[in-house]
Amino acid sequence: MVDIHCHILPNSDDGADSMDTALLMARMAADSGVTTIIATPHSNLPRAKEKNFRDAPLAMRFVELIQRVRDAGIPLEILPGAEVMCMPDTIGLLREKQLVTLARTDYLLVEFFFDERLEYMDDMLDAIAAEGIHPVVAHPERYEAIQQSPGFIAQWFAKGYIIQLNKGSILGRLGRSAQKAAAGILSRGLAHVVASDAHDTLARTPGFNGLQQYLEDNYGFDYARVLLELNPERICRNQPIIRAD
């Protein structure tokens, strides 16, 4: 399995708070059957000191993490990425190649403030796609606008925008509203990828054990495989994703 959204890079955001925590997260992921993780520290946040892997401290931490995972004998590949906050300067930074895509592909993981207007989100995703980049919408089930207007996901799906749900939302660990929205998206076959969005080893973990079984039990083996294996692998290889409809 492949996890395309994980805050495993230590001391970079509100994720892993140390290299030791990052290594525990890596071990937990590998033990649950995850073979590849894309490290996605928050990027382009207002007032953030370090914005992405192009900043030297983040790049150095990434290289160190890969080496430490290798030295620990953990069978896990870690690739570069970022979770990009959509801001007024996002398109300019994208044109200047200042934003880090998922595994250096044409897929860009993007997020919005939870109370963002639906019209703004739609306009930003359209603008990103117009640049020849495939937007991967991080945890749309957590956005208030989508919770209130869940049918809008079908429009993004029809446009080819990638819908990425969070493990925690599906399993009811991020609130009832997020769980309900995630269940609606899954039941309609509108999700492309499920990721951990892991931040630690206790509350928001990178293990896929319970997640894989839950998806298989509730939505079928084939759909679970698309969400956890086939589409994440295709994103890493810069290949077209599979539509589950």
Image (spheres, grey):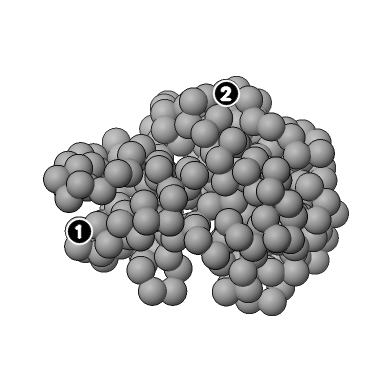
Q: Is residue 197 left or right of residue 14?
A: right
Relative to residue 39, is residue 149 depicted above or below? below
Q: Nearer the viewer, residue 143 or 210?
A: 210
- Residue 54: quarter of image: top left
What residue did someone put label 2 on? 239
Q: Is residue 153 left or right of residue 30?
A: right
> Does the rendering let one see residue 59?
yes
> Does the rendering let one see residue 91?
no
User: Could you give the CA–CA distance between mark 2 and mark 1, rounded to whole angstroms?
Assistant: 32 Å
The residue that appears at 63% across and 25% down in the rendered structure is 240
Residue 98: x and y, percent?
39, 32
Residue 133: x and y, percent?
58, 28
The amino acid sitting under disc 2 is Gln
Residue 19, numbered label: 1
Q: Is residue 189 left or right of residue 200?
A: right
Relative to residue 179, is residue 224 depicted above or below? above
What SS does tag 2 mark?
Answer: loop
